[in-house]
Image (cartoon, coloured by chain):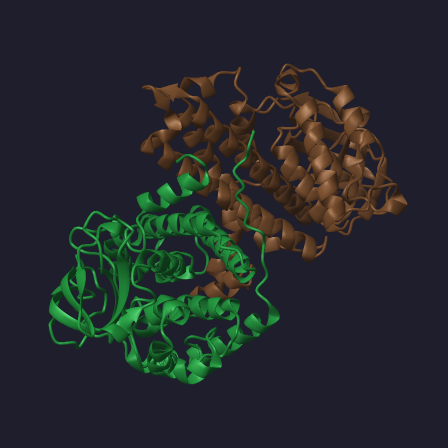
Amino acid sequence: MSIPKLEFPPFHLPPEAEALRVEVRAFLKETLPRLKTDDRFASWNTRSPEFSKAMGKKGWIGITWPKQYGGSERSFLDRYVITEELLGNGAPAGAHWVADRQSGPLLLRFGSEEQRQAILPRITAGECYFSIGMSEPDSGSDLASVRTRAEPVQGGFRVNGTKVWTSGAHRNHYCITLVRTSGQHGDRHKGLSQLLVDLKTPGITIRPIINLAGRHDWNEVTFTDTFIPESCLIGNEGDGWLQVTSELAFERSGPERFMQNFYILRELVRVLGRQPAKRASAILGRLVARLWTLRQMSVAVAGMMQGGKSPAIEAALVKDLGTIYQQDLPEIARAIAESDATTEQDMADFLDVAQYATMMAPSYTIQGGTTQVLRGIVARGLGLR
Amino acid sequence: MDRDTRDMLLETADRFFTQRCGRDVVNGVEKGAWPADLWQEIEDMGLPLIAVPEDKGGVGGTLADMLALLRLAGAHAVPVPLGETALANLLIAAAGGEPKPGPATLALGNLALNGGRLSGKVERVPFAAVAERVVAVVGNTLAVVAKANAKVEARPSHAGEPYGTVTFDNAATELSAASPASAERAFELGAVMRAMQMAGAADKVLAIAVEYSKQRVQFGRSISTFQAIQHMLAELASCVAATIASAEAAARDADEGGLLDGGRFSIAAAKSQASEFAQRIAAISHQSMGAMGFTHEHILHHYTRRLWVWRRDFGSETFWGDKIGAAFAKAGPDALWASLSASKYAA
């Protein structure tokens, strides 16, 4: 019997990464109380340019990148520690998150020298923020069906089409946009390219798409005969699919896929008080155990990546389990708090957080690859398709 | 032992278990037949002495080596107390004793030791009905009692293994010695042992379900081509992956931190995790295999029933969840992340 090999070799973050953790914690302890954020649910989608610039000053954005572009040439594991400390301490890291996680690495890997020099040092300074221009009204999970067309013209491209769910486009500087540069709609993976689009370019209209919680994170970004210079093509014309899938790997494997609503676990500990009844402490402990497991899996994936492997199936498993955990968390927490909160006042405060977490929960298993897309990837890895 | 030696041993053991722990042997144990030949061969290979130092006649492996072997044993539903005996022998050797041949088990519970004599009762002792000696740890003293001096009331587990209630009535001990591992620690070591066996069994369940889905044809095609089945098996894989990852991390931490107190939090978390996901793993695998997997003839139940039993052995998710939850609640919200990221109980 051929057993599908699922291995998550236990991995220790190295001493230099643990030393960095101590520094990051001290910085956050000092910095976070000084920031004026009215967001009690700060996470990787809460923005504070002030915080991002402070992170940039420490050299903690793009930390793995070459020094010539403002990086520190430190390991991927150092970056891992920074991201999990930001999440664990509720830092408003949303402004630079996407640039640090995927846009910068994409430019580093596929971008031109000119693009790298122009953009990367600004990202590492915490001053330059990115949106992701993948989804369209008719292209959600089926990303290869994008219709936005970039028609080659003298000196560049004329772009027409619409991108949706574009987080932060109204405040960010650039959007890496997946477009069709050749072939026909229906050619699937062929003829796609990625463009580095300055969101201030004439011919771009940005309209808000308000989410169910009443927040304006998303936008609709419309291109109407928008001229994008040739110098903004990322990589080779026609390589867009290959590039976008490598970008998605960065997007899936990180701790933000199981720690996005870590605040609810903190709140639960607070509301249960120091000596909860056994039933409540057992449920709390099980939640902690599941989160610990996710972290072990994620660190193991980071270790494999550092070792030069590309554990795509394992990364998909982490996101699948992690996002489901994030959906279970507010429900389980609410159920125990209902019976075991120490005071009415505590419960009222807790409910504010829990209700918000409940409203946001559906998004976790949609963004960055739906549960169903991920399970398709895993099924392929199991040899089922 | 070094990595190559361990891999070689595991490969040999894998072949051996494949040949000698087939369906009939596992079913035979459920019917009350003790596979004496199988046990003898396991002893001849030195497996119960894997973590006993060479100067005490053992193989000289580490706790990690032992746990890796037990994960493999879990993947074969090895129906003899290899884990219990290997752990008992490790504890006996650590307390300065000489392990003896024969299957042993661990009775960890509310016991009293007075003047070298053991009293008390422990429920659900694994393989109590076939063990030749019972190892107990009371406080910081290890006691070994021969079968003849303990009263065993057979009470087979729901996986058909010869569990039982063990009563000691001022029982004479073969050995009573100071134990480096406390009673609490012995229980933790039992928990990480079971977590690794569960990882092995979970891995096997996934393999069985995946293989079945490829073979089974319905509506004119193999059911593995149905998206509904693919997604069920992908979810199964995620639960299995979590079980493996947590158990392996706990095994590593237990080994690296030393026999006395290595990986205390990791073990608690891993056993809680394994026990919590056992039901999902069993439920999805059975659903994907329909009536076939529900028969006694099929081997799926060798693994799913063990997962159901093992989730309670050496502490359920409620037991370990309470340990973790009580410590984390006591330390308060500000200690939560620092403890979790250090794999430590909050303090």
Q: Where is residue A107? Give x, y as percent.
A: 36, 71
Q: Quadrant of the C terminus of chain B?
A: bottom right
Q: Is residue A273 left or right of residue A215?
A: right
Q: Nearer the viewer, residue A10 or B331?
A: A10
Which residue is situated farthest in the bottom direction here? A57
**In the picture shown, does residue B299 fall above or below A166?**
above
* Front in this rendered view, residue B48 or B9: B9
**The quadrant where residue B66 appears:** top right
Give the residue displayed 48% in from the left and 73% down from the top. A64
The image position of residue A13, as x and y in percent, is 57, 64
- In the rendering, what colour is chain B? brown
Whether residue A270 is situated above or below residue A316 in the rendered picture: below
- Give the residue drawn at x 41%, y 85%: A57
Residue A89 visible within the image: no
Q: How many discs mark residues in the rendered view?
A: 0
- Residue B103 lies left or right of residue A323; in this view the side is right
In the image, taking residue B171 as reference, residue B111 lies left or right, namely: left
Q: Position of residue A156 (x, y in %)?
A: 21, 72
Q: Is residue B225 visible?
A: yes
**In the picture, residue A102 is in which quadrant?**
bottom left
Write the residue at 55% across / 32% down: A2
| In the depicted structure, whether residue B326 falls above or below residue A223 | above
Please state if B123 lies on the left or on the right of A87 as rendered.
right
In the rendered structure, the colour chosen for chain A is: green
